[in-house]
Image (cartoon, helix red, strand yellow):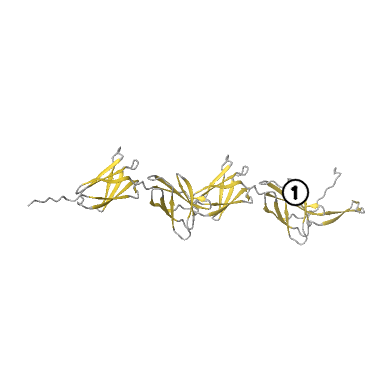
Amino acid sequence: MGNEIVTHVTSGLTNGTKYNFTLFTVSGNVRSSGVTISAFTAPANAKDFKSVGQNETSVTLQWKKVENILTYVLGSSDGEIDVTAEMGNEIVTHVTSGLTNGTKYNFTLFTVSGNVRSSGVTISAFTAPANAKDFKSVGQNETSVTLQWKKVENILTYVLGSSDGEIDVTAEMGNEIVTHVTSGLTNGTKYNFTLFTVSGNVRSSGVTISAFTAPANAKDFKSVGQNETSVTLQWKKVENILTYVLGSSDGEIDVTAEMGNEIVTHVTSGLTNGTKYNFTLFTVSGNVSSSGVTISAFTAPANAKDFKSVGQNETSVTLQWKKVENILTYVLGSSDGEIDVTAEMGNEIVTHVTSGLTNGTKYNFTLFTVSGNVRSSGVTISAFTETHAKWGTAD
């Protein structure tokens, strides 16, 4: 009583079905002629409504078609659009587009039958975040590569993939640049690294770079000979690597090893006599140098000038030569062996008396200048000791 409008809910009906309802007014057990309307129950919601993929600007949605219904409405914060399913396909796939990267969207799907919508089913899905910019290698050693990239907005989560698998990398708050050192790698090896930005458990498409670990340093790097203007260097080749860089105070030069030879021999030239040089050898693979190994080597000092005999007696020869620059150490060789001769400071001329010689004998003397344990090529002279005088008695 008191309500002008009568409301009645029918129940136990079948979804998505057209019903004809006839309403009779009853007074004193007498009905009116009746008035008839048609009405539909709401269709069922689609099942298995889900996101099956995304990129930076789109999300791919999928659901099972409701019976033979082809008409659906898809709503989001950008509004509603009509989606028409294809005949014969149980699964409906729809790609949204024009979205913002790394953003969470709520999608509501309505089934439509006879202009009546289902109650709707809602899911959340993320677009893929943007890829990191300036992804690059900024350093390496024999077992690691240092990678660097710009952080994407405020995203702190990244996945780094390589042939060794994937690892999670968490960026630091407040730093625009992310630096990560990979480790446990093999020397002189090319690696492909793929970096994914992760937002809402969704990855970016990924960006890939190649980087090399540093090759191993050459072993047995040493000086095996020298003269006044050159040093002969030698080392073992690193695996099959043919490219090396040799550095000294005179700069760097490229050295290419020969195929098939395990030992590399290189002669430096144009050097200064009696000088200590530091040589650093780098192995090069994929334009990446090893850490380098350094040795010191001396060029041979100059031979002494004016090496000569300036006197003799029956058992000795007096030898003389000009001192080489400030070098005080010399070796004097003869058939009796070698002896060390130390020059005096401040005297340009060195004088040395050999002794214990045999009278009337020719001796070959070779003089070596010594600097840094390296000898000059040597200069040789010959000299005679005096013979015994013979005294006779007159008859």
Q: Quadrant of the N terminus?
A: top right
For the residue carrying disc 1, how many other residues have a C-alpha within 10 Å: few (<14), some (14-19), or many (20+)?
A: some
Name the residue furthest top. 346
Pick the residue in front: 356 or 104. 356
Q: Please, what is the three-letter code of the amino acid marked with disc 1?
A: Gly
Q: Is residue 10 left or right of residue 236?
A: right
Name the residue furthest front. 395
Name the residue furthest bottom. 88
Mark 1 lies on residue: 75
Instruction: Locate residue 329: give its quadrant.
Output: top left
Pick the residue in front: 257 or 63. 257
Q: How many marks?
A: 1
Picture residue at 22% right of the left edge, 53% below the top: 361
Picture residue at 32% right of the left edge, 48% below the top: 368
Q: Is residue 241 left or right of residue 103?
A: left
Residue 30 location (% of width, % of height): 92, 53
Pick the residue in front: 167 or 148. 148
Q: Is residue 134 left or right of residue 388?
A: right
Residue 267 location (% of width, % of height): 43, 52
Look at the numbered disc 1 and give the secondary structure of its residue: strand
Above-or-below relation of 71 to 251: below
Residue 369 location (% of width, % of height): 33, 46
Residue 156 location (% of width, % of height): 59, 44
Picture residue at 11% right of the left edge, 51% below the top: 392
